[in-house]
């Protein structure tokens, strides 16, 4: 039987739930506070009702602490647990989202969060400005970025080398980077960068919903709450954007331009992504031992990432299904063999300066290449050669689209791309399937034409 005791203007309900492994009593408590205006009789009736409900939940083992706040659970339990169980890049993204989530829910008891609180939060996010104001370098910023070497500017300004490359290429950077640039060159931010303040995208709002759901579901597993309110909430709708890709002609044009004008290692990386559909981190993470020159296969088993506080580091592939061995053509194998001979010559030339990292694609001294450097180079290369606008990830989409439009089975395409299911492939590349479907209709029509009766009579005559 639950015990009820009055403390000031609230009531403490205590329930005994047996003994633990050490023989100590297990006691669970909750606090209930009457609403203003309730009569003594109403209070007595309601507190007894709460005691019965609390005792039932305790007996089922589904309530641990009704008084725990959302903020305490996140900071003391969930984040420390996640830090040791997820990728550093994912953990950084989670902690970044806490800047918006904790002010909204941190003070609330986790057991009191309801769907209407979540809907209000999503509505507020739709009106909120992005914290990471986009800063687009102007011509003056690009010029100043070329006034000294990358290493010199990186050290003096206090930003990474890949960030310097981004400014030179005219790519967007953070407001923090823009301020450091302005301070170093003794000018205003607006004289070097165009500031663009956007509202949060629908996908960003969905990410917040998913993280909230992950946290609350973990609280269910921890027996702190009975159910996850996010499961009773409709997820924010996302405006799906079509994957950016090149058609066959554009892809061939890019390939020829890269082979003709690009230098090592970029003239090898770009064709390799187009042929394999690898992600940026996957191609940068390749070791020479991953290439089977005899059987023409590539083992994709790791990813190379970059974080400001960690630098360049290795990690597992994006998902378990991303670990895969794919077949490539002899042209790709010959290209890699030629590049290996060139790299060996470069290593001999540099002598002790060369650091043997085992990586296929490296910086000038053999250290692993920064994935951001690849993106910055490609952005500038596409712009300088007046090629169709496309990102490194867009090359992966291009490879997928070519496979689908060429009639490669969806299961094969999904496996080659490292998707967990073919449903993921279908969702992302709906445009390619629509094109393939139209081509299929033409094939069927050519094989089984539907003729008019008049045409049949003429044919029979």
Image (tube, helix red, strand yellow):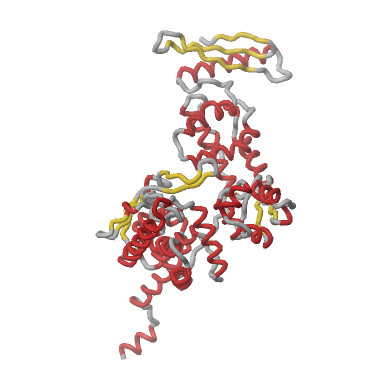
- Give the number of marks: 0
Does the rendering let one see residue 433?
no
Residue 259 spot, x, y in % from top left = 43, 69
Residue 143 spot, x, y in % from top left = 65, 61
Judging depth in this view, the residue of 189 and 128 nearest the camera is 189
Residue 309 spot, x, y in % from top left = 54, 41
| Above or below for 31 versus 405 | above
Taking the image as shown, residue 55 lies to the left or right of residue 122, namely left
Residue 53 appears in which quarter of the rendering? top right
* Residue furthest to the bottom: 461
Q: Residue at x 25, y 59 (%)?
A: 295
Judging depth in this view, the residue of 12 and 94 nearest the camera is 94
Question: Quadrant where the C terminus lies?
Answer: bottom left
Q: Residue at x 50, y 44 (%)?
A: 311
Does the rendering let one see residue 168?
yes
Taking the image as shown, residue 110 lies to the left or right of residue 258, namely right
Q: Residue at x 65, y 39 (%)?
A: 120
Taking the image as shown, residue 260 lies to the left or right of residue 103, namely left
| Above or below for 220 versus 298 | above
Residue 93 spot, x, y in % from top left = 54, 41
Judging depth in this view, the residue of 39 and 367 nearest the camera is 367
* Residue furthest to the left: 294
Residue 269 appears in which quarter of the rendering? bottom left
């Amino acid at each position: 039987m639950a015990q009820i005791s009055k403390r000031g203007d609230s009531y403490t309900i205590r329930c005994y739930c047996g003994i633990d492994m050490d023989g100590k009593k297990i006691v669970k408590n909750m606090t209930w506070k009457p609403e203003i205006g309730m009569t003594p009789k109403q209070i007595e009736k309601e507190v007894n009702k709460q005691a019965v409900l609390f005792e039932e939940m305790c007996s089922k083992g589904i309530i641990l602490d009704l008084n725990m706040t959302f903020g305490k659970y996140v900071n003391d339990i969930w984040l420390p647990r996640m830090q040791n169980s997820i990728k550093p890049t994912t953990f950084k993204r989670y902690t970044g989202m806490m800047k918006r989530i904790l002010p909204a829910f941190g003070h609330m008891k986790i057991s009191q969060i309801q769907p209407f609180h979540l809907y209000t939060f999503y509505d507020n996010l739709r009106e909120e400005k992005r914290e990471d104001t986009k800063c687009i370098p102007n011509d003056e910023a690009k010029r100043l970025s070329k006034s000294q070497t990358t290493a010199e500017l990186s050290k003096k300004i206090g930003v990474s080398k890949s960030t310097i490359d981004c400014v030179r290429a005219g790519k967007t950077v953070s407001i923090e980077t823009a301020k450091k640039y302005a301070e170093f060159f003794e000018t205003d931010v607006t004289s070097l960068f165009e500031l663009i303040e956007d509202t949060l995208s629908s996908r960003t709002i969905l990410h917040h919903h998913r993280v909230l759901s992950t946290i609350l579901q973990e609280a269910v597993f921890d027996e702190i709450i009975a159910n996850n309110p996010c499961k009773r909430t409709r997820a924010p709708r996302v405006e799906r954007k079509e994957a950016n890709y090149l058609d066959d002609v554009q892809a061939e044009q890019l390939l020829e331009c890269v082979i003709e004008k690009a230098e090592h290692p970029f003239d090898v990386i770009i064709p390799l992504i187009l042929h394999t559909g690898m992600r940026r981190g996957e191609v940068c993470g390749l070791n020479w031992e991953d290439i089977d020159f005899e059987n023409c296969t590539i083992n994709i088993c790791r990813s190379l990432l970059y974080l400001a506080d960690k630098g360049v580091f290795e990690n597992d592939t994006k998902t378990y299904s991303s670990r895969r061995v794919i077949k490539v053509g002899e042209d790709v194998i010959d290209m890699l063999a030629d590049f290996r001979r060139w790299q060996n010559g470069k290593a001999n030339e540099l002598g002790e300066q060369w650091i043997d990292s085992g990586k296929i694609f490296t910086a000038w001294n053999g250290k692993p290449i920064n994935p951001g450097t690849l993106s910055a180079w490609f952005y500038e290369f596409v712009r300088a050669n007046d090629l169709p606008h496309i990102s490194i990830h867009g090359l992966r989409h291009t490879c997928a689209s070519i496979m689908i439009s060429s009639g490669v089975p969806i299961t094969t395409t999904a496996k080659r791309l490292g998707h967990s299911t073919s449903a993921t492939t279908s969702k992302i590349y709906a445009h390619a399937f629509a094109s393939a479907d139209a081509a299929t209709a033409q094939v069927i029509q050519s094989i089984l034409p539907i003729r008019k009766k008049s045409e049949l009579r003429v044919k029979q005559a």
